Amino acid sequence: MKHRLALPVGLLLLVSLAVAAPDSGKSVVTPQSAVKWSPAGIPGVSIAPVEGDPAKGPAHFFLKYDPGLVTPAHHHSPDHYVTVVSGTLTLTVDGKENRLGPGSFFALVGQKSHVARVEGQEPAVMLVDASGAWDVVPEATQEAKK
């Protein structure tokens, strides 16, 4: 008789980080009680690193967007791979709106411009796998350089 184990998405994500911490050469285990949130320098956005240092290089971290948050068009220098853990996020890429709930995944590579909007009354929490130092580059800045 085969047994199936159903785990919440957030727990699965933490387990996956513990099993395969890319490029670090060591295992990482971060229970939910050890996840430490801090302001991310943008109103309505919090960050909780769980592996690596997002300011210095490749890292895994949670981002939390407050309800109602709408970002201006922007991109990030590193390629990044994101799983929505809770809440609902509408991500606009190439003019197309994508409504993403828990368990949804997106990958933004090549400094792809996007806009994010939190739907509903709960924060949107995402787990980010960034391939390099994390930054936020407003598209207006890029336009001014042209």
Image (cartoon, rainbow, N blue to C red):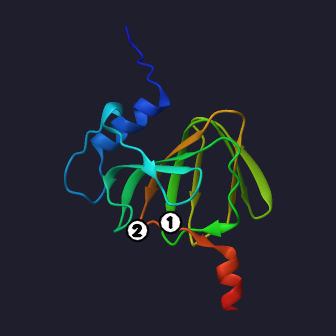
Instruction: Kindly state the secondary structure of the residue where label 1 is placed.
Output: loop
Relative to 3, is 95 on the left or the right?
Answer: right
For the point 70% across and 87% down, the residue is 144
For the point 34% across and 68% down, the residue is 56
Residue 34 percent coordinates (x, y)? 30, 37
Q: Residue furthest bottom?
A: 146
* Residue 138 in the image: above or below residue 53: below
Residue 95 percent coordinates (x, y)? 80, 62
Relative to 61, is 30 on the left or the right?
Answer: left
Task: Give the numbered dot on residue 132.
Answer: 2
Q: Nearer the viewer, residue 133 or 42?
A: 42
Distance, label 1 to label 2, CA atoms, is 7 Å
* Residue 125 in the image: above or below residue 32: below
For the point 68% across and 49% down, the residue is 69
Q: Residue furthest left?
A: 26
* Residue 141 in the image: above or below residue 88: below
Residue 83 percent coordinates (x, y)? 53, 45
The earlier-in-sequence mark between 1 and 2 is 1
Contact, mark 1 vs mark 2 (Cβ under 8 Å) = yes
Q: Residue furthest top?
A: 1
Q: Nearer the viewer, residue 15 or 3?
A: 15
Image quadrant where one finds the N terminus: top left
Q: Which residue in the protein does label 1 denote?
A: 79
**Which three-letter amino acid code belongs to the residue tagged 1?**
Asp
